[in-house]
Amino acid sequence: MDIYPALLLFSIIILLYWVITELFTFFFRLTGLPSEKARFQVISLLTGTGFTTRESEIVLSSRRRRRLARVTMLFGYAFNVTIVSAFINVFLSIKAVQARYRLLGFLIPLGTVALIFIFMRVPKIHAWGDNFLRHLADRVFDRQEAFNAVMLIDNISSESIAQITIRHIPDEYRGRSLAETRLRAETGILVMLVERQGGKPMPAKAETVFEIGDKLTVFGDYKAICKTFHAREHFADD
């Protein structure tokens, strides 16, 4: 294979690898994982590095995420073989060309890397891509506003820290202060922080009344959290 087709193929594979990483990250975010944690786990699964952290327990704690992790690992294995093959073709092609043509050929993969860097590092472009995925998710999965969104932040033993985005206040909590709801006494769920109107998260108080748009950081049993707040896993960071 000539060097230019080989480098072009290698560049396309690099671009596809990045697209696939973002796509699987998107799928994991649909299950309620924060963006950075989702991307870290996807890279670990795709590359087959076996790098695990305590955050991997978040993936194992959900049947949906376990299934998605299996698909990611299998896909990553097949794609890694393709990348190695393409890299060998590039290496063999380099030996067959003169030095002055090698530099020109390497501009192709460098341009691909630059394109990826621009998309990831330029805030406006990255925000455009992120918003496109959000709107696509809403249309495909037909999100129902009657359900609140839950994002799993971390697991501590058998308990979880999660963030609830209030889109619909459950009837039993509407217009009642946190003290009146007896939330912790009856469900074991502790409301730790309340973020309102994009402001700084503040500690929850006894007189706190839930409002539409609030983001609650809560601690307790994950299934109980979802049931109590009528919440479903959806696009994280929304």
Image (spheres, helix red, strand yellow):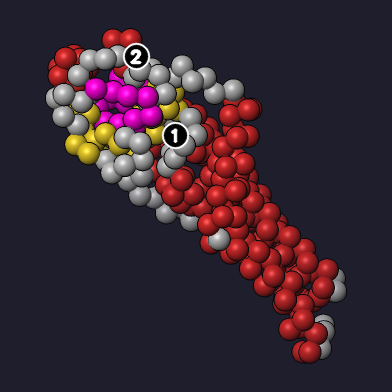
Left or right, 36 with reference to 143: left
Q: Residue under circle 1?
A: 32
Where's the N terminus, which quadrant? bottom right
Q: Residue under circle 2?
A: 170
Return the x and y of residue 55 as percentages of the image width and height.
36, 44
Q: Residue at x 67, y 72 (%)?
A: 110
Q: Residues within 10 Å of mark 1 (few under 14, many from 20)?
A: many
Q: Which residues are magenta?
A: 209-226
Left or right, 138 with reference to 148: right
Q: Residue at x 38, y 29 (%)?
A: 213
Q: For the residue marked with disc 2, what is the amino acid?
A: Pro
**Residue sitting at the far right:** 2
Q: Answer yes or no: do the residues labelled 1 and 2 have beta carbons within 8 Å?
A: no
Find numbered disc 2 in the image and state the secondary structure of the residue it sits on.
Answer: loop
Which mark identifies residue 177? none
Q: Residues within 10 Å of mark 2 (few under 14, many from 20)?
A: some
